[in-house]
Image: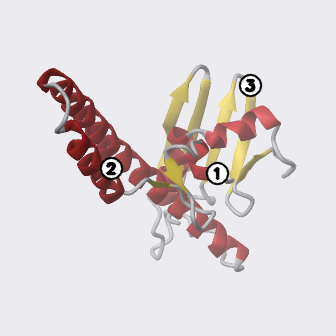
Amino acid sequence: MYVYAGNNPVRYTDPDGKIAQAIPIPEVITEIELLGQELQNVTPQLAIVSCVVIGIVLIAQGVNYVQNKNFAKALGIIYSAAESVAGGAPPPLTPDDPDSKGTQTSSKTLYNKNGTHIDVENPGYRPGQIHVQQGNAKYLYDVGKKAFVDKAGDLAPKAIQKLLEDPKVIKAIAKGLKILGY
């Protein structure tokens, strides 16, 4: 699953086509310095207002940078797991295996919003799974396809796949993959 520049190409760049990156802080600082030079010729009140606005922009950029870094880390976990599966690696061992890296858990909700929840299960006697559930409909997350599938392995409906555009869902899946030992 891939959404260009975190679905916000105005705020992010995506030079390699894999992980969105916030516009670099040094570039923002350079622009602020240029604006500061221009503000030398305006009234003090306008300069103060401009400085407050600049401060708000810098704080927003900092918060955005941290959120984007976490999102990029989650995408990295998902891509790494998918590449290992594509390369022929078997799924992680069951948690009761002494060589397992997964954590045994009966069912843990990782995301819950508007009647949709994403859970991870790793009971110990079979390979674990991540699934999304809406009402009675349940779809498994296929690591190799980076998509939700039904029990037959066919892609879930578009509305379910669209969930993968939400950074919170991506972070939940990455957390689930870590629990499963990917």
Residue 59 visible within the image:
yes
State left or right for residue 86 relative to residue 76: right
Q: Which mark is on residue 31?
A: 2
Which circle's residue, 2 or 3, is located before the other in the chain? 2
Q: Position of residue 168 (x, y in %)?
A: 50, 39
Identify which amino acid the numbered label 2 is placed on.
Glu
Residue nearest the observer in this picture, 20 or 11 = 11
Q: Residue at x 71, y 46 (%)?
A: 140
Distance from Cα at disc 2 to Cα at disc 3: 52 Å
**For mark 1, does the 10 Å Cα neighbourhood hold few (<14), some (14 to 19), or many (20 or more) residues?**
some
Q: Which mark is on residue 136?
A: 3
State left or right for residue 110 relative to residue 54: right
The residue beneath circle 1 is 4
Q: Is residue 64 above or below residue 29?
A: above
Residue 176 visible within the image:
no
Distance from Cα at disc 3 to Cα at disc 1: 32 Å
SS for tag 2?
Answer: helix
Q: Position of residue 171 (x, y in %)?
A: 49, 47
Identify which amino acid the numbered label 3 is placed on.
Asn
Q: Position of residue 120 (x, y in %)?
A: 55, 46
**For mark 2, does the 10 Å Cα neighbourhood hold few (<14), some (14 to 19), or many (20 or more) residues?**
few
Q: Residue at x 80, y 37 (%)?
A: 158
Which circle's residue, 2 or 1, is located before the other in the chain? 1
Identify which amino acid the numbered label 1 is placed on.
Tyr
Q: Residue at x 58, y 20 (%)?
A: 114
Q: Residue furthest front?
A: 41
| Foreground disc of the pair 3, 1 | 1
Which circle's residue, 3 or 1, is located before the other in the chain? 1
